[in-house]
Amino acid sequence: MFLRLTDEQKMVQKTIRKFVEQELMPLESEVLRNEREGKPGISAEKLRELQLKAKKAGFWGINTPAEYGGADLGHLMQAIVTIEVSKTFVPFKFGGSADNILYYANEEQKKRYLIPTINGEKKSCFAMTEPGAGSDTRNIKMTAVKDGNEWVLNGEKTFITGGNEADFVMVIAITDKEMHQRSKGREGVTCFIVDRDMGWRSEFIHTMGEWGPASLIFENVRVPEENILGELHKGYQLGLEWIGFARWMVGARAVGTAERLLQMAIEYAKQRVTFGKPIAERQAIQWQIADSAVEIEAAKWLVLNAAFTLDQGEDNRHLASMAKLFGANMGNRVVDRVMQIHGGMGYTRELPIERWYREARLWRIYDGTDEIQRLIISRNLIKGNVKIGQYV
Ligand SMILES: Cc1cc2nc3c(=O)[nH]c(=O)nc-3n(C[C@H](O)[C@H](O)[C@H](O)COP(=O)(O)OP(=O)(O)OC[C@H]3O[C@@H](n4cnc5c(N)ncnc54)[C@H](O)[C@@H]3O)c2cc1C
């Protein structure tokens, strides 16, 4: 066991850190200004330009297999890269990637959807949640009924990230009601790849964050049989796989953001003088800094362990739930303390703290709420599927 990054991993971390500091952080004021005028933080052209710069530095498709032109760095490196990129709120993501479940596409689907997504020519979204089925994913109602060589989809999805911009959606619908009921929702649902021009429409949802998900409405949308992703009636597993990946990445995002916020708090505390002394010299402030540092470190190890476990080809779901639950809550506690340390300034729109404060609240809700993570962790332990201290 060696609890340090290798020289190669350190080099990747350093290069990404430099990219974030030199290319992304200088855009922060512009992003805040744009968002406050109701515009996207950065334009699609600017995003593309940044992605190409990152590509030149060797960062394209961080986790995309080499056969698709990606860097294929693995999950541990993906976590490290995500932590670094999350130190800024500039809405950047590396080019050259696609949703994990899109790799289940057959050869024809790969040509039509996977490759254009990797190349940035098409945007995707994934839709499982419905107005009546969020945590309780097995309670979905959207139906797909076979008609000749097509499936006819009816229903509504909600809170779909990227749903207003996507060219196609990977959507989960019930394809066999009887099987769905008998298997308590685990089978009888299928994942379809559905182009926007096949007829679904989207409606933007305003949230307290700076970007909004969308509702997707399907009214008699006809989808050809060849657009089934993976196997017929086995879409639930794909859904779980999609959510599973996103889960520990929330923890990674929280770690990166909290590290940056804590640095801001330390700098502010050293220069803000009250009653004749910098507030950094007050124990009340020092303890908030110390507690934040300890919690960030703990969350980071949970995230890295979840990612490392996946790289070993092992089931990381228990660890992913822990990383998500602790990471999301740690992030909320840290941003709250950092706002407190900044006093009134922290609450203003002069600084980005209030923006992160609003964003952080989402971490405890999407990709499985706090309560659902606790349910998973305790169920694994009570049923004996995972033993205490099993991993290290
Ligand atoms: C901004 C945003 C983006 C999203 N992006 C996507 C996306 O891209 N694709 C997608 O499919 N979905 C997406 N979601 C949906 C998200 O995953 C769900 O909102 C989330 O799973 C919670 O579901 P819900 O909102 O229906 O809450 P509910 O399931 O109705 O839960 C309400 C409350 O009850 C609690 N609760 C529920 N069941 C239990 C239980 N058994 N025991 C104890 N407490 C319980 C919950 O923890 C929560 O506190 C997104 C949501 C948001 C807000």
Image (spheres, rainbow, N blue to C red):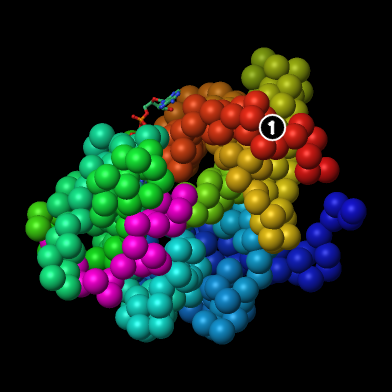
Would you call the spot at circle 1 few (<14 residues within 10 Å), some (14-19), or many (20 or more)?
Answer: few
Q: Is residue 364 visible?
A: yes
Which residue: 49% across, 54% down? Answer: 241
Left or right: residue 386 versus residue 389 is left
Give the SS element for disc 1.
loop
Query: Outermost residue toward the left?
Result: 220
Residues 366 and 238: in front is: 238
| Magenta stretch holds residue 220 | no
Query: Exactly how many numbered labels are in the figure?
Result: 1
State the image coordinates of residue 391 (x, y, percent, origin top left): 78, 43
State the image coordinates of residue 389 (x, y, percent, origin top left): 80, 35
- Ligand 1's image quarter is top left
Left or right: residue 219 versus residue 361 is left
User: Where is 6 relative to 59, above or below?
Assistant: above
Q: Is residue 211 visible?
A: no
* Extent of the magenta region: 221-240
State the image coordinates of residue 292 (x, y, percent, origin top left): 68, 31
Label 1 near ligand 1 (CB < 8 Å): no
User: Where is 105 relative to 170, above or below?
Assistant: below
Q: Quadrant of residue 232?
A: bottom left
Left or right: residue 310 versus residue 169 is right
Which residue: 24% across, 37% down? Answer: 131
User: Where is 284 relative to 122, above or below?
Assistant: above
Q: Quadrant of residue 279?
A: top right
Which residue: 47% across, 71% down? Answer: 103
State the image coordinates of residue 122 (x, y, percent, origin top left): 32, 74
Residues 21 and 186: in front is: 186
Amino acid found under the numbered disc labelled 1: Gly
Circle 1 is placed at which residue position? 384
Left or right: residue 289 versus residue 34 is right
Which residue: 64% across, 30% down? Answer: 383
